[in-house]
């Protein structure tokens, strides 16, 4: 009993904030913003930052999972690159503003300009084979190459608005999202049809596009409440499946399989689904700024780049998954016992919110040291659940505490490995 009292005293004094699920993996030496990143596997990837100091070393490569990044020479200063596509760790394409398309065939030792037109801006890039690729951008521009980027042909698109996300499900069928348009081709880009999508203003843009098969697809938009839209009939009809007020724009999307996907937002948070978009949980990160790109090269390992050029990494799928189980207003605040308990490595924590407000759920060891912040954000009245992953902590007894306004409660959990 005495030990429990000592723990409860320590838990209120301890303030060692920890974001164990998404961690800052790399911080650049110079101030910059990163708008694009891709990894070929868990270790090898590229990202680009915008430098305004006259340097042309604005493409970065890692071969050790982001522990170190080596700056590479793009030959252009103050250049904003917006999309990367990797055919191989050595064969990589990158496109961006001022109509630049670059290519390396030797892992970035040399980057060659294969297209340039200062009147254009390219925001989407996708290859369907080692030879055939597409870029999309300003003024309804879509271009295609069939010889690894040596030559590009302008395709006819039924729009003059800006285009962004690209995704092809096979060599013939592909989709391009843009400002208030969503285009589809079934003949490798010869013709495009506007499938309209589900937009609320002429300025709302489909920033990222993903299709799990020829019929099932998603896009996220740049509105402040991160609208997520889904089709199950190849783009003929679209349904709004999620919106989250105040979470910021949905800038990028990465799926690891047909059911599990992630979206990085303008409020430093990540949305995750494990049931093909039916529910979207919220993951916290150490940042509160725009998270511009997200990519999962494997089921558990993911990377994010941000407005300040930082690279975030997770090795357990971000772990935290918050779900609203019931929006009915309960009659009291309550923290429920986690289940299963004991557990390894995941357990579910449930709680009730009586009033709108911030909820903080943190995990502490038996000495009162905070080992993880599981939840720390604002909720409406209702019943919620979150998945806690104990990877990174040892077996033993832990305590989790809910704090919301003047309410607080503590429960015990046991990790068995």
Image (tube, rainbow, N blue to C red):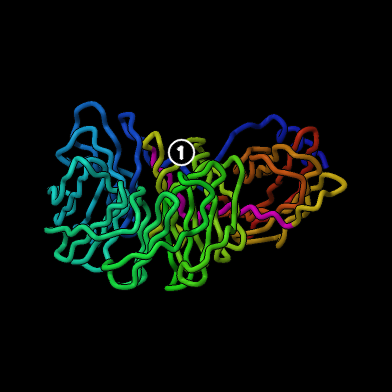
Position of 267 with respect to 350 (left or right) is left
Crowd rating for badge 1 (residues with CA inside 10 Å; few <14, some 14–19, many 20+): many
Depth order, front residue of 182/356: 182
Position of 154 with respect to 184 (left or right) is left
- Against 48, residue 9 (above or below) is above
In the structure shown, which secondary structural element does the residue marked by tag 1 occupy? loop
Q: Position of residue 20 (x, y in %)?
A: 53, 45
Given the current orientation, which residue lies at the most extreme top position?
53
Q: Residue at x 71, y 35 (%)?
A: 11
Q: Position of residue 170 (x, y in %)?
A: 33, 72
Q: How many marks?
A: 1
What's drawn in magenta, residue-wise? 310-325
Is 320 one of the magenta-colored residues? yes
Q: Quadrant of residue 166?
A: bottom left
Q: Residue at x 64, y 38 (%)?
A: 369
Depth order, front residue of 391/97: 97
Q: Is residue 69 visible?
A: no
Position of 91 with respect to 28 (left or right) is left
Q: Residue at x 16, y 58 (%)?
A: 152
Rendered-image quadrant of the N terminus? top right
Q: Position of residue 64 (x, y in %)?
A: 31, 51
Q: Position of residue 130 (x, y in %)?
A: 20, 67
Depth order, front residue of 40/102: 102
Which residue, given by chain and number where applicable, does mark 1 sit on?
Answer: 290
């Amino acid at each position: 009993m005495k030990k429990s009292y000592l723990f409860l005293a320590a838990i209120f004094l301890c303030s060692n904030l920890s974001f164990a699920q998404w961690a800052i993996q790399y911080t650049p030496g110079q101030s910059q913003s990163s708008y694009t990143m891709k990894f070929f596997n868990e270790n090898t990837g590229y990202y680009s930052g915008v430098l305004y100091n006259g340097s042309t070393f604005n493409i970065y490569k890692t071969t050790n999972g982001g522990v170190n990044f080596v700056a590479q020479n793009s030959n252009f200063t103050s250049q904003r690159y917006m999309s990367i596509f990797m055919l191989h760790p050595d064969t990589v394409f990158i496109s961006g503003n001022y109509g630049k398309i670059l290519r390396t065939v030797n892992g970035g030792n040399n980057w060659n300009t294969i297209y340039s037109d200062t009147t254009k801006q390219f925001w989407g890039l996708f290859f369907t084979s080692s030879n055939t690729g597409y870029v999309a951008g300003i003024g309804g521009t879509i271009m295609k190459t069939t010889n690894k980027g040596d030559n590009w042909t302008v395709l006819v698109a039924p729009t003059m608005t800006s285009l962004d996300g690209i995704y092809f499900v096979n060599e013939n069928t592909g989709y391009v999202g843009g400002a208030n348009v969503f285009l589809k081709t079934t003949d490798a880009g010869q013709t495009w049809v506007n499938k309209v999508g589900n937009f609320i203003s002429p300025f709302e843009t489909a920033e990222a596009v993903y299709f799990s098969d020829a019929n099932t697809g998603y896009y996220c938009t740049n509105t402040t409440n991160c609208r997520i839209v889904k089709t199950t009939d190849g783009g003929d009809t679209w349904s709004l499946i999620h919106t989250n007020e105040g979470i910021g724009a949905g800038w990028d999307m990465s799926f690891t399989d047909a059911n599990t996907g992630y979206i990085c937002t303008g409020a430093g948070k990540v949305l995750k689904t494990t049931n093909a978009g039916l529910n979207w949980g919220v993951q916290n990160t150490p940042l509160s700024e725009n998270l511009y790109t997200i990519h999962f090269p494997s089921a558990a390992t993911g990377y994010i780049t941000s407005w300040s050029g930082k690279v975030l990494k997770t090795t357990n799928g971000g772990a935290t998954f918050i779900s609203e189980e019931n929006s009915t207003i309960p009659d009291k605040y309550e923290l429920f016992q986690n289940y299963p308990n004991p557990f390894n490595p995941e357990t579910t924590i449930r709680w009730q919110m009586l009033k709108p407000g911030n909820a903080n759920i943190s995990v502490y060891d038996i000495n009162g040291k905070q080992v993880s912040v599981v939840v720390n954000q604002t909720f409406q009245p209702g019943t919620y659940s979150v998945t806690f992953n104990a990877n990174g902590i040892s077996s033993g007894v832990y305590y989790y505490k809910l704090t919301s306004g003047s309410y607080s409660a503590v429960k015990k959990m046991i990790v068995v490995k």
